[in-house]
Structures are given as C-alpha cells and as structure tokens.
Image: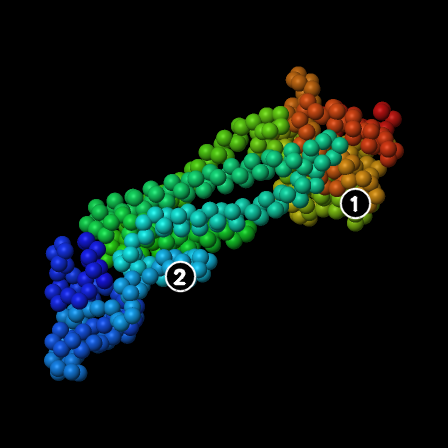
Amino acid sequence: MRCRTCDYALWNLRARVCPECGSPFSVGDYEFVPGSVRFCCAHCNQPYYGTDAKGHLDPREFECVTCGRAVTMDEMVVVPAEGVRDQDTATTLPWMMRRERGFFSSYFRTIGWGFAYAPQIGRALAVAEPGRASWFFAFGTIALTMLLAFSPMMCFMLPATMGAGGPGGGGGARALWGPLVVFGSLLAGIILGAAIGLWLGPLIAHGTMRLLGSGRGGYNRTLGAVCYTCGPCILSAVPCLGFYIFAISLIWWMISASLALAEAHRDRVWKGVVSMILPALLVPAVPIGAWLVVVFWMMGAGGALGGAPIIAQIATQAKVSSLSMAWRTQAMNASGPIHAAQLLESGFVKRETFLLETSRLAFEEVPVGSLTLADFGSSAGTALSETQQSAIVQAAAALPADVIAHRLGDFVFTYHGIDPTIAPADLWVVIAAPIADPLGPASPLAEYVTATVGSGVEAIAAADFPAALAKQNDLRARYNLAPLPPPETITHDQPAVAADQ
C-alpha cells in the first residue's frame, strides 16, 4: 500500500495523510490479496483479516471482539500479515511474476487477463508501475500474432516454389525469393508500424486523460493499461480467419484498455473510454499505413529477376502453379485436357487465371471455341452451361492432331504428349508468356515463369530464357517430344505443331 503521489509505503499509520508528501488517502481505495494484510484495531491492536474479493473486511464496521469499541476499516492500522512481503499484498500482474512463476505461464496468464480481467490489470498497475516492460510485452504479442497470421500464406506458397529447379537453373531459390521478399516486407512493415503505434497510442490516451482532469498516476500506468490488455489481438492469428476477426479483436482490446485505464488512475470508466477513442483508430492505422507503404513500394519495385514488380511476380507464379496443378489433377484422374479451356471444368481455376495482372488482353480477345473468356464466370467451381461446354469441345477439336503447344490468354500450355505418371518432373507444362508485341520488344516480359510436371515453379529472367529453352528442348528430345518454339510466338490462331519444328 503506497502513496499514489510519491510512492511512500503507508503501512502502520494511524493518520490518513502521507507523512512524506501530505497527500490524503483512504484504506478503502486500495485492494489487497485476501488474507495478506492485518487490519488492527486502533484502540487495542486486535488484528483482523480481509476476506472479500478486494481483501477488505466484511463487514467494514463492527465492534472489536477485544475492547468492545466500534471500529471501521478505514480507521484501522494496516500492516502486512506475518511472513507476507509488501509486494505480495496487492494484486500482481502475472507477467511481473515471470521469474517466480515461469515465462510461458506468466505470459499466457497475462494474455488471459487482457481478455477477461482488465480491471484487475488496472488495479495492479496502481500499485506497481511496469515501465517499458509493458511495451515489450505488447510488441512481442503483436509480432507473434503477425507471424502466426502470415505463416499459412507461406505454407501455401512453399510447395509450389520449393519443387522448382528445372533445367532453367536455380528455380527453387529464384522462385522462392519473391514470396520471401513480399511476406518479409509486409510483415516487417506491419511490425514496425505496430512498434510506433504502441508508443503514440498510449501517449495520446494519457494526454486525453490529462485534459479530462485525470491521469495523475503517470504515463507508465497509461502505457501499461494499453499494452497489458493486448491479449484479444492474438485472435487475429487464427489461420484464414484472423483478417475477418481483426475488427472484433481490436474493439475487445480497446474496451479492455479503457477499463484498465480507469482503474489504473482510479477514475471513472467514461474517461478511460474517451481517452481510448483516438488511439483505437491510431494503433491499427499506423501498421496498416506502414503495410500500404510497403505494398506501393513493391508494386513498382524491381524484383531480383529482370526488374519485374514483386507483386506481379508473385501473382504470376501463383497462377502458373494453379494451372499446372489443375492440369496434373485432370491428367492423373483421366486422359487429361486437350485444350486448356477444359481446366475451367476442374473447379480449380477461373477465367481470371488465364490473364496476367499486367495483361494487354481483355477477356473478349481470348477465344474459346465460339465464345470468349468473357462468356465464362469469374468464380472457380461454377457449373458450366451447355453452351460453355460446347464451346470448350469446339476449342479442343480445333487443335491440330500434332499440336505440341497452344495458347490460352497469357499462358502457353506445353503438356501435349506428356504422361504425368511416367514423365520426368522437369518437363515444362505451362509457361507464362504474353503474345509478342510486333511494335515493341521481342517479349513484354521481364521474366518468364514456368511450371513443370512435378509442380515446380521457376522464374527465369528474359535474358536467360533462350538458354533455358534450349536445355528444355534437349530434355524433350530425350523423351521423343518435339522442340518448343519461343512461347511468345505461339498465338491463339497458330498453335505450335510438330511438323513446323
């Protein structure tokens, strides 16, 4: 039990004024661990022990059993119970006891308090101020949340990139570089923004409390109230659902912080709520702003391969991977698709999959039999109409018997004559290669992206692609497959056939 103005120990005092600074106090303003303090009769020193939830006497007024005089709790002399330390008499945050109780136990107990026991956090802060420990607690929690939230995305991307390494050389490392840059940059941006927000948010909250005539307990109490109640934010780490429940976790956190803030400064709840309105907007706004800065940077930043924007590189790799896996699924379960438009029947891809983010084509310019891609839905797995199925059959029937590669949108499909059950894993089945622009360079791509029979994805710089194509054709020759021409020369009207090679 310490003075809230100068931190002087107020034990064993009859007067209700701090002997150090003169500030008045009341025993009823403090809370104790039940049974941890002795309330001694001011007349005969008979001890009593508080047993209610706040460690107070129940009832607070009664006749002393020894001297028979009427006594009240606020008039009694208060001292720690025998064998109890000063710091053990008040509610203590589990995190402050991590050395005694263990790191993980204390951490998760404090997270739980943030969910359900916010007022207790404020009461504990009114007794022991946390200093910078609370900031590191919240920062670590948010960083952990972001790592858990982003990990599933990387897990989905890794199977497509780690399997690369075909004859173009360096596929796995080069394909993996883009996703690592993207997710690493986004994660770093969000965490850096959170670090800044965790300083600015409590600072603004404390300034608001001061304007409302409160907050005299000091900035550290405000900082602790905001940071130690961050437990609900860990809900955002739920895989696949974290983004959708982010708003719920944020509101929960701000409500808990408001309650803790009011208790920490021993003031009304409405002041805590008002003080947290602006930080509730600022704390998420700073990391989101940092994330947007990183996104805009990546949209124009040069990638490690040929200067391709990183966002576009990742999108291209994802589409190539989706197309190759859809082909493999059909080829393993049936005779395999003749025309790539048949992949629309697989339920794995949609019309948008066949055009790059930077495509020069419109859906209306991509023929599918008597229709175009514009006539197909934009949702994967949608049942196709008879007209759409008939158009796909027409597209397949229009391919020459000796076709070795054909185009659909910005992708060239080279799986003709390949049996996935016996073919080598390094054979290409899909290539991202837009049609050559006759008025521009040989290829509008800064890099090509290929997918193999083994579902490996490889990003190849445009300057390196001719050599990679030559190696691929050497591999095809060993398996009696005709060589591939430069993929950007293959059009919708002119598929590559064996007789031309």
Q: Amino acid at mark 2?
A: Glu
Quadrant of residue 261 within the rendered picture: bottom left
Q: Is residue 353 visible?
A: no
Choose the circle earlier in sequence order: 2 or 1: 2
> Which numbered circle lies on residue 116?
none
Local packing at callout 1 (Cα closer than 10 Å; few below 14, some 14-19, many 20+) is some
**Residue furthest top as drawn:** 439
* Quarter of the image where the C terminus is located: top right
Q: Residue at x 41, y 43 (%)?
A: 194
* Residue drawn where x is 27% and y is 58% of the image: 127
Q: 174 or 357: nearer the eye?
A: 174
Q: Which residue is mark 1?
A: 331
Q: Secondary structure at mark 2?
A: helix
Give the foreground label among 2 and 1. Answer: 2
Q: Residue furthest front?
A: 83
Q: Which residue is mark 2?
A: 100
Measured as percent of width and height from the top left, residue 385 is found at 71, 45
Q: Is residue 7 visible?
A: yes
Q: Amino acid at mark 1?
A: Ala
Question: How far is disc 2 from disc 1 in space, using C-alphas?
Answer: 61 Å
In the image, 54: left or right of 494? Answer: left
Name the residue nearer the viewer: 401 or 326.
326
Q: On screen, 7 above or below 151? A: below
Q: Position of residue 346 (x, y in %)?
A: 72, 46
The residue depicted at 59 percent of the width and 44 percent of the height is 154
